[in-house]
């Protein structure tokens, strides 16, 4: 059965690139346009397991750090790995991301191979 990844990014073009790379590699993808949308989708997925969350940092309505903090408060997603995929690369923001529960950090722009390589390390077989 395919592993499911939640992609959270306010940029439709980046979401499309991520979705194409991930679905091409055999993953199932659910996408959300910001943290509010992502929390709503997580609430709707009572039966489905999310194997990885890939999240941008800077988004309207609810940014990535707040979203990850809130998602990690839900026991169902406490151990779900999170990778931040963002233009941000300052140590301060990375520390906030780690404190919120992010396990990995990738800076945009990225190559599909980089993304898939990181994903394969974060999703256990």
Image: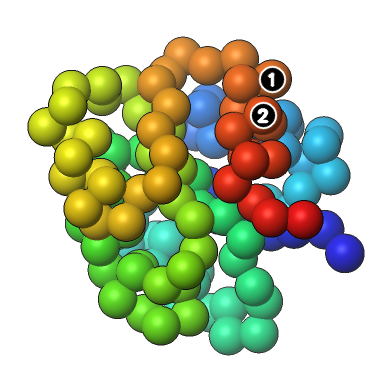
- Give me the disc on residue 121: none
Q: Residue at x 87, y 64 (%)?
A: 1
Disc 1: which residue: 113
Q: Is residue 92 left or right of 87 when viewed as pictured? A: left
User: Are there few (<14), some (14-19), or many (20+) residues within 10 Å of tag 2?
Assistant: few
**Residue 50 location, x and y as percent?**
60, 65
* Residue 101 placement (x, y as % from top left): 32, 56
The x and y percentages for residue 109 are 46, 14
Q: Which residue is drawn at 69% across and 20% down?
A: 113
Foreground tag (1 vs 2): 2
Circle 1 crowding by C-alpha within 10 Å: few under 14, some 14–19, many from 20: few
- In the rendered view, would you say 71 is above or below 23? below
Where 39 falls versus 103 (above or below)? below
Residue where numbered disc 2 is placed: 117
On the rendered structure, is 94 left or right of 55? left
- Examine the rendering and report whether any part of residue 13 can be seen: yes
Image quadrant occupied by the C terminus? bottom right
Can you tell which quarter of the image residue 83 is in?
A: top left
**How far separated are the C-alphas under marks 1 and 2?**
6 Å
Can residue 60 be seen here? The reply is: no
In the image, 125 versus 54, the foreground residue is 125
| Outermost right residue | 1
Residue 102, x across and y down, in percent: 36, 49
- Find numbered disc 2 in the image and state the secondary structure of the residue it sits on: helix
Colour scheme shown: rainbow
């Amino acid at each position: 059965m395919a592993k499911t990844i939640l992609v959270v990014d306010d940029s439709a073009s980046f979401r499309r690139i991520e979705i194409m790379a991930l679905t091409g590699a055999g993953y199932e993808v659910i996408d959300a346009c910001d943290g509010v949308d992502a929390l709503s989708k997580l609430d709707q997925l009572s039966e489905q397991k999310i194997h990885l969350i890939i999240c941008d940092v800077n988004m309207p309505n609810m940014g990535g750090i707040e979203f990850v903090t809130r998602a990690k408060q839900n026991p169902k997603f406490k151990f779900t790995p999170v990778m931040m995929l963002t233009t941000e690369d300052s140590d301060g923001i990375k520390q906030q991301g780690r404190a919120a529960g992010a396990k990995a950090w990738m800076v945009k722009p990225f190559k599909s191979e980089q993304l898939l390589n990181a994903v394969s390390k974060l999703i256990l077989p």
